[in-house]
Image: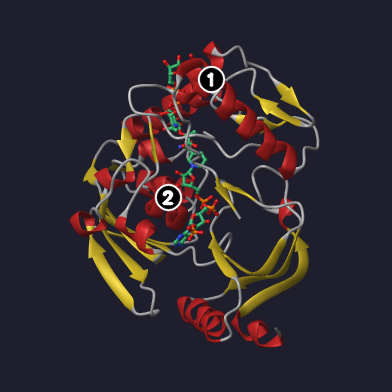
Amino acid sequence: MKEFEKYGKVLKNEPLKKYTSFKTGGPANLILFPESEEDLISALKICKERNLKHIVLGNCTNVLAKDEGFDGVVIMLKGVLKDISVSGDLVTASAGATLREVAEHALEKSLKGLEFAHGIPGSVGGGVIMNAGAYDGELKDVVESVRLLDNDLNIIELDNKEMNFGYRQSIAQEKGYIVLSAKFKLNKGNYEEIKSKMEDLMKRRSDKQPLDMPSAGSTFRRPEGYFAGKLIDDSGLRGFTHGGAGISEKHCGFVVNKNNATSKEIKETIEIVQKVVYDNFNVKLVREVKYI
Ligand SMILES: NC(=O)C1=CN([C@@H]2O[C@H](COP(=O)(O)OP(=O)(O)OC[C@H]3O[C@@H](n4cnc5c(N)ncnc54)[C@H](OP(=O)(O)O)[C@@H]3O)[C@@H](O)[C@H]2O)C=CC1
Ligand SMILES: C=C(O[C@H]1[C@H](O)[C@@H](CO)O[C@H](OP(=O)(O)OP(=O)(O)OC[C@H]2O[C@@H](n3ccc(=O)[nH]c3=O)[C@H](O)[C@@H]2O)[C@@H]1NC(C)=O)C(=O)O
């Protein structure tokens, strides 16, 4: 595993709970923070050649990591590969940049279109692959093109149409491609108007969502014709507690870590909620959170 040290900072047996927004997860054998795209590709090549279990993570806001940890290599882009550049109305951002940072860059240049993404805690990579959305926007509305690594680690570029975005979905997610960077096409706007829209959305988010508790945002996708939070609420599960985990008092769509929960307790909470909602409403709640 020593060879990974050529490609960036390496941490061995590092608890994932230090990085995940759920604040749970045992140690990963190795976490690599690649310093450049080339380093990321070299590290992925080693993983593939040696058949090492590996995963690429961004800001760790949409994952539940096992208490036993991750028996393999975690390539983490949190804090690295975060270049952002602006040319006219196009903003280019590397996969590790946070959506917040990209939205703030756009604001500085009075470019509108990314206000909705300002409060989304994920990275450009995690956001693009899932077509992150909130309030009146989705990344698919502003993505011009995406640079990716295909399954043979070739760099390819897909335009918005080719990304085949859907609700929390993209072709790149289906195929298991890695996002290197994305180009966002914005529009010239008014600085004060953009800023005030960002502030308004942030306020709506903090009024409605339990941002003060560890979680991975919405735990479940929106089932067609329903809202997960409402189904859970109507099942009488508001504030439900299971060990250290449970359902938020503030927004029932959020499974939260209430008090030093384990990932096992969070997973069990998710399963209990799925069962209760299915029994009550005959609706299957599909997880948005990824188990790793
Ligand atoms: N709307 C909201 O308020 C919120 C939204 N979210 C969503 O969760 C996502 C979280 O982003 P983030 O925290 O960075 O993701 P994570 O670090 O939590 O990673 C989650 C998964 O995304 C995939 N992924 C991450 N980075 C890349 C990359 N560079 N290329 C390809 N796949 C990648 C991986 O999937 P795989 O293992 O399959 O390769 C990974 O397992 C965003 O899409 C965001 O929409 C989260 C919280 C709140
Ligand atoms: C937080 C995430 O994204 C969020 C995003 O921030 C918000 C705001 O746009 O809209 C989605 O939440 P959501 O589907 O729960 O939408 P909300 O507007 O909060 O709630 C939907 C409806 O359910 C009702 N509701 C919500 C919570 C609750 O406890 N009880 C209840 O009845 C609300 O009153 C509303 O009528 C995204 N979630 C999904 C799965 O699509 C995330 O993806 O992690």
Verify CB contact (< 8 Å) between mark 1 and mark 2: no
Is residue 261 placed above or below 76 in the rendered structure? above
Which image quadrant: the N terminus?
bottom right
- Residue 196: which disc? none
Of labels 1 and 2, the one closer to you? 1
Q: Which residue is drawn at 26% across and 57% down?
A: 163
Residue type at tag 1: Asp
Which element type, helix, strand or loop, lies under badge 2?
A: helix
Which element type, helix, strand or loop, lies under badge 1?
A: helix
- Residue 279: which disc? 1
| First reached walking from the N terminus: tag 1 or tag 2 | 2
Depth order, front residue of 27/174: 174
Assess mark 2: CB under 8 A from ligand 1? yes
Q: Position of residue 161 (x, y in %)?
A: 19, 55
Residue 138 vs residue 265: left or right?
Answer: left
- Residue 127: which disc? 2
Residue type at tag 2: Gly
Q: Where is residue 196 in the image (x, y as percent from the top left)?
A: 39, 28
Depth order, front residue of 278/94: 278
